[in-house]
Amino acid sequence: MKKTFIAIAFMAGLSACTAKFMVPAQSDADKAQSKYPGTTLADLSHGKALIEQHCDKCHSYKSPKSRGEADWNVTIPKMVKKINGKAGSTVLSAKDEKDILAYMVVMGKGK
């Protein structure tokens, strides 16, 4: 009984520490048009995939809702520059940066 309780508590704590990234829908792509003209559902999905692929290498995932648009506009370019600098090459392109930023802003606060 005690081991079961400890295992459940551990799993609950572990799941609370990870951000859950929402899968973008067409309505999110439509919403993105006002700030990021030409952004498609595929672009938002690409941004989500890049976040899941790269961002936990240096820190825990951050929920899109953890910051507002102004903060993401500063944070995302800084993190892309850091990733590319550590690699010594272009790992994330300007297009990748745009897709990540669009995903975090559109899926973030105000959603």
Image: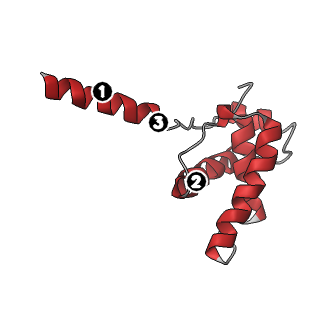
Image spot of residue 73 (x, y percent): 81, 46
Which of the two discs, 3 and 2, sits closer to the camera?
3
> How far is disc 3 from disc 1 in space, using C-alphas?
13 Å
> How far is disc 3 from disc 2 in space, using C-alphas?
14 Å
The answer to which of marks 3 and 1 sits earlier in the sequence is 1
Q: Secondary structure at mark 1?
A: helix
- In the image, residue 1 above or below residue 36: above
Indicate left or right for 62 with 102 as reference: left
Q: Which residue is mark 1?
A: 9
Residue type, numbered disc 3 = Cys
Image spot of residue 103 (x, y percent): 69, 43
Q: Secondary structure at mark 3?
A: loop
Residue type, numbered disc 1 = Ala
> How far is disc 1 from disc 2 in space, using C-alphas?
26 Å
Q: Dot 3: few (<14), some (14–19), or many (≥20) neighbours within 10 Å?
A: few
Q: Which residue is mark 2?
A: 55
Indicate left or right for 31 with 5 as reference: right
Q: Dot 1: few (<14), some (14–19), or many (≥20) neighbours within 10 Å?
A: few
**Camera-side residue: 18 or 104?**
18
